[in-house]
Image (cartoon, grey):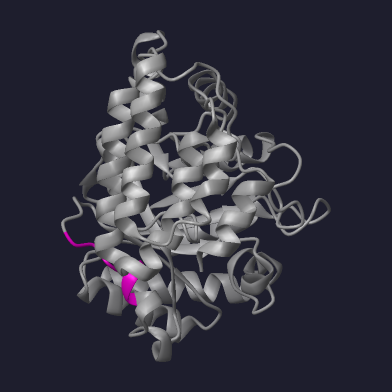
Amino acid sequence: MNIGPHVLPNNVFVAPMAGVTDRPFRQLCREFGAGHAVSEMVTSRRDLWHTLKTSRRANHDGEPGPIAVQIAGTDAPMMAEAAAFNIDRGAQIIDINMGCPAKKVCNKWAGSALMQDEPLALSIIEAVVAACAAQGVPVTLKMRTGWCQSEKNAVRLARAAESAGVALVTVHGRTREQGYKGEAEYETIAAVKAALRVPVVANGDIDSPHKARAVLQATGADAVMVGRAAQGRPWIFREINHFLNTGELLAPPLVAEVRRALLEHLHDHYSLYGAYTGVRSARKHIAWYVRELPGGDAFRSRMLAIDDCEQQVQAVAVFFDALGAAMDRLPANRRVGPDHMDQALLENAE
């Protein structure tokens, strides 16, 4: 499938996730078969563009194209300026965030809060499209089904976005009010797909090859986007692609392959964040890899006490060496999605 002039290798994407989909994680997902990867959201506030946090989020060193950057904000001229700024830094696709449910984002009327104010949302879309069109850069939009159960306006807003020139729309099958609770619904995504000519991507609770196929069939969507299920399980993209292409399930990855991938991920992670922040922010990724593995809970707890990169790498290597001595491949049917310990590691990572 295409996004504007860009031809993508497949229709299984990794979702932009704040604090997760940095450059090392995006590249890892691509290596395991993700057909498209969008950056963490970058603020439209000019005074924050040159902060360390934003510069890390906007880092694309060595990243294969097309480079897609998600921007967030509430002011149309500022969002247009942010789009132009990121294009100058290498962005080839600009994605508008109208899907983030986080309170710290929605309290500022950004993210999914924009779905409450359709005129403002449309003015932002039009301004960003105009700024990007001048440089031949397509614009995509990520949204939710609506603000709450009684205000599901995804179809109406998606139609307006398409008319304004958006090249692709992604819909997460929950309202902002739901956050990530309950189950995603796909009827609204199907309605958006039926209403549009541009490609539509289905997002929400896609955690297995079977679920990906079922969602594609139920919605008629052109692609699926995987979020939380890719945390600690980046090979899910090749599993889904293989199943969609052949109808067959792949065996779980070899322990040796997972060991190699995680260690490479850690080194790339440290190179972006530096030793002090890197060893702390890597904890959540390590925790996601080892959850539900033998000895995984105890190992996750140990990670909180390790503050040195070399010690962290060594501990991971030893853990997987021991696991590899007991089994060739990871166990099948591992649980997906964060738990209470993952949340503690996320909070401890900053």
**Number of numbered discs:** 0
Q: Position of residue 238 (x, y in %)?
A: 34, 26
Residue at 24% across / 34% down in the picture?
Answer: 9
Tell me which corner region of the image, top left, top right, bottom left or bottom right, holds residue 56: bottom left
Of 134 and 95, which appears nearest the observer? 95
Residue at 52% across / 83% down in the picture?
Answer: 75
In the image, taking residue 161 as reference, residue 3 lies left or right, namely left
Q: Position of residue 221 (x, y in %)?
A: 49, 33
Is 275 covered by the magenta stretch? no
Residue pushed farthest bottom? 47
Residue at 65% across / 34% down in the picture?
Answer: 186
Res 138 seen here: no
Q: Is residue 97 above or below residue 205?
A: below
Q: Where is residue 226 in the image (x, y as percent from the top left)?
A: 48, 39
Tell me which corner region of the image, top left, top right, bottom left or bottom right, holds residue 292: top right
Q: Is residue 62 above or below residue 130?
A: above
Q: Give the range drawn in magenta.
A: 55-61
In the image, taking residue 308 as reference, residue 225 lies left or right, namely right
Q: In this view, does 311 lie above or below 77?
A: above
The image quadrant where one finds the N terminus is top left
Of 349 and 307, which appears nearest the observer? 307
